[in-house]
Image: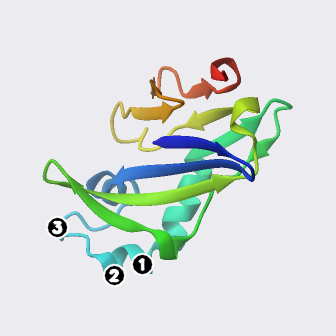
Amino acid sequence: MQLQNTEAGLSATLELSIVDLQQALNWPADQDVRWSDIQKNKTQIISYLHQHLHVKSKQNNSCVLETEANAWTAVEKNQTYYLSLPLFSTCDAQQSSLHYQLFSELHDHKLLVSWQDKQWVVSQQSPALNLTQMAP
């Protein structure tokens, strides 16, 4: 996940493995996921994201990470396909923490977060990343 603090709040790009998404959302495992399947299930994907990924402000208010499905793309890396999602929130990244629990029902999934030229790992053992402490 690439994070950026903007004038409007937090901006991010999240790449989700389509195979992991297929398993987490209980889509049929005996067939390949097509772009039309992703478009057809965008409400389910967004709901899953809202349940498992959010930002909390310094005042402990939850800020939803929003996405626009028409801006989604598929990308290939190392022979694996990912769904690339632009995300945005009105929370100030330098006054927030990121909470991540995607794919926790599948395996010990980790999220690599890039912010301000540094990288961190968020996992089930450590599901929150305090961005406030990492502000310049």
Residue type at mark 3 is: Asp
C-alpha distance separating marks 3 and 2 = 16 Å
- Left or right: residue 108 versus residue 121 is left
- Total numbered labels: 3
The quadrant holding residue 32 is: bottom left
Residue receiving disc 3 = 30
> Between residues 125 and 88, which one lies in front from this camera angle?
88
Q: Nearer the viewer, mark 1 or mark 3?
A: 1
C-alpha distance separating marks 1 and 3 = 19 Å
Image coordinates of residue 44 in percent, x first then y, are 51, 67
Residue receiving disc 2 = 36
Residue receiving disc 1 = 39
| SS at mark 1 in the image | helix
Residue 120 higher or lower than 49, as above or below = above
> Between residues 7 and 122, which one lies in front from this camera angle?
7
- Left or right: residue 129 versus residue 109 is right
Residue 15 higher or lower than 31, as above or below = above
Residue type at mark 2 is: Ser
